[in-house]
Every structure is written in C-alpha cells, then in structure tokens.
Image (cartoon, rainbow, N blue to C red):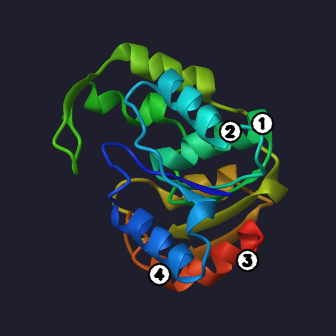
C-alpha cells in the first residue's frame, strides 16, 4: 500500500497527490493508494494514519510536512518512505507561522498554536534508519533548505536535483522510480 501524506495547509487535491493517484490507477493499482486529508493537530494526524494503514505493509510518500509525518511513522511502526522536500523540524520551522491559517485547497481556517509546535517536537525522531528512505529534493526549494534533508537522511538513497522548487517540479519523471521503490 502507498499512503501519500500531503504538506502543511495542503490536501489530497494537491498536484502531486493527484498525479500519483492517476499514475497508480492507470496501472491497475488504484486500490493500493490512499491519501487521507490530514487534520491540523499532529496527534490526530498520527491516529488517522494508523487507522488508514492498520497492519498493512506500507510505503509512505511524504511531501514537506508529510515527510516529517512519514519519518515518524516509519520509525515508530516500520515500512519505508519516499520523502519529497521533507520538513525536518517543524516545531522550529513553523514557529513563525503561529496564528491564523487557511488550507490552500479547501479554504478551511484554523489556528496554528504553540500546542501544535509542542506536538511536532514530541514526534521528532532523533535517529532514523537510512535504508528505509528514498529522498527526493530539489536545490531550488524556496521554502526548506534541501541541505538539511540531505544531512538528516545521510546514508539513505538520495536524488538531489539541481534547480526546481519546493513543489518538486520534477516529480512526474520520478513516478516509475517511486513505484519500484514501493515494491510495485
């Protein structure tokens, strides 16, 4: 099973999620794909992911903040993950965004609070198992410093693409590799 975890203020309607879903459907794998709408509270995100995955073998695809969640899930419950420009320490990186937020796709308003940051801190995994990850980053990421991800996932399979942006502009060309990595 592939579980796509979207980023901060994103949704299952994100471009990458839709591309992955379509790509898998075209190969007769639609039933092997899930992309839940992640709640705003980190603890609720973890509960939701656990309910979606159950005891199935899983490969997460985590984009940005979804990469942070994917890392937590892999280290807590096993499996593996493809990380796309992942957030490394959202308890630090999102501190500047505390306050009113709005989902970019649904328009849903909510408040990012210090409690959210504390929950991110609780989910931070200091040590990872490198062989469980495929890291995809672009050096032109305007939101997150790709070098932090390269350092954090040292020893993992890594693809560092010159240029691009936070959305991983080159994502469509990596779909076959992602499916292979996931075991399909």
Which badge, 4 or 1, comes first in the chain's sequence? 1
Report which residue position mark 4 lands on: 172
Which badge, 2 or 3, comes first in the chain's sequence? 2
Q: Is residue 161 visible?
A: no
Distance from disc 1 to disc 3, alpha carbons, whole Å, reads 21 Å
Report which residue position mark 2 lands on: 73
Which badge, 4 or 2, comes first in the chain's sequence? 2
Q: Which image quarter is the C terminus in? A: bottom right
Which badge, 1 or 3, comes first in the chain's sequence? 1
Distance from disc 4 to disc 1, alpha carbons, whole Å, reads 28 Å
Q: With respect to residue 136, does 111 lie above or below?
A: above
Tell me the element at label 1: helix
Residue under the image location 42 percent in, 67 percent down? 16
Distance from disc 4 to disc 3, alpha carbons, whole Å, reads 14 Å
Judged left or right of residue 134, residue 49 is left
Report which residue position mark 1 lands on: 77
Relative image position of residue 40 (x, y in whole percent): 37, 29
Tell me the element at label 3: helix
Relative image position of residue 113 (x, y in whole percent): 32, 18
Q: Which image quarter is the N terminus in? A: bottom right
Judged left or right of residue 23, residue 98 is left
């Amino acid at each position: 099973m592939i579980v796509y975890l979207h980023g901060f203020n994103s949704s299952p309607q994100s471009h990458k999620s839709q591309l992955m879903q379509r790509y898998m459907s075209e190969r007769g794998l639609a039933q092997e794909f899930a992309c839940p709408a992640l709640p705003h509270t980190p603890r609720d995100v973890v509960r939701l992911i656990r309910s979606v995955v159950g005891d199935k073998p899983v490969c997460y695809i985590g984009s940005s903040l979804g990469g942070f969640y994917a890392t937590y899930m892999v280290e807590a419950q096993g499996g593996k993950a493809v990380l796309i420009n992942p957030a490394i320490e959202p308890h630090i990186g999102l501190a500047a965004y505390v306050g009113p937020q709005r989902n970019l796709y649904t328009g849903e308003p909510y408040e990012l609070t210090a409690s959210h940051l504390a929950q991110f801190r609780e989910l931070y995994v200091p040590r990872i198992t490198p062989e469980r990850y495929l890291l995809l980053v672009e050096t032109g990421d305007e939101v997150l410093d790709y070098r932090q991800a390269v350092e954090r996932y040292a020893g993992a399979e890594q693809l560092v693409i010159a240029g691009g942006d936070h959305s991983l502009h080159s994502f469509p060309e990596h779909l076959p590799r992602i499916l292979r990595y996931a075991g399909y």
